[in-house]
Image (cartoon, helix red, strand yellow):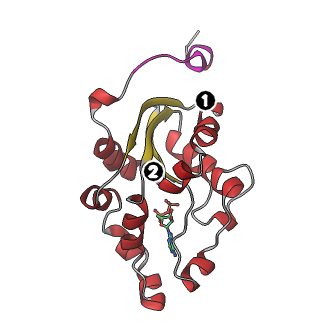
Amino acid sequence: MEKERTLVLIKPDGVIRNLVGKIIMRFEDAGLKIIGMKMVWADEEFARKHYRDDLDEKYKDVEKKFGRNVRNELVKYLKEGPVIAIVFEGVDAINVARKITGSTYPNESLPGTIRGDFSHISKNFANENNLMVRNLIHASGNEEDAKIEIPLWFSEKEMHSYKTVYDMICFEGE
Ligand code: ADP
């Protein structure tokens, strides 16, 4: 089994709330390795490449019931300010990063997760009050998403191969 890579974005609300350090710490503490990191202010075209049209299908019920297009709102949210984009590498990194991130809706996210500890809005409150679900962070949902998202945000040259102390202790065979 190979180590995995996953894309994490600290969304504009995480950056303007000065939570960048605290958020990155959660992933580093779990032993995930930063192999690429930068600050990017996405434009419309780039944000639409990240939030792809499959989201229209996923959120079609919200559109039908509340007349809101979640994908369009998300694109606007992502463009509000600079984001911190990070590629983390590790064993089962995609699932582990999702676990550290918490559920999509912060009110359902457990304490100890980033969304659970730093936000609390619910899906219903957002839908009924026409609000964005500001949940601080994006983490690739699965292998397929990670394969699309990582090359969108990072070139091969922007990712680095090196050993952490964690690698030396946990991942080197006898
Ligand atoms: P996740 O970010 O947990 O992988 P999705 O990719 O399905 O979840 O959704 C992308 C983002 O859309 C969520 O992180 C959240 O910011 C936003 N979102 C989800 N549902 C709603 C909603 N009903 N109203 C507004 N924003 C929403």
Q: Give the Cα separation between the discs numbered 2 and 1.
A: 18 Å
The quadrant where residue 85 appears? top left
Q: Which residues are magenta?
A: 161-169
Q: Is mark 1 within 8 Å of ligand 1?
A: no
Name the residue type under label 2.
Ser
In the rendered image, residue 60 lying in the magenta stretch gets the answer no
Residue 118 % position (x, y):
67, 55
Left or right: where 90 falls relative to 60: right
For image coordinates 62% across by 15% down, the residue present is 169
Q: Name above or below for residue 127 compared with residue 74.
A: below
Left or right: where 135 falls relative to 161: right
Residue beneath disc 1: 31
Residue 63 % position (x, y):
42, 84
The quadrant where residue 135 appears? bottom right
Residue beneath disc 2: 140
Left or right: where 127 falls relative to 45: right
Residue 35 % position (x, y):
43, 29
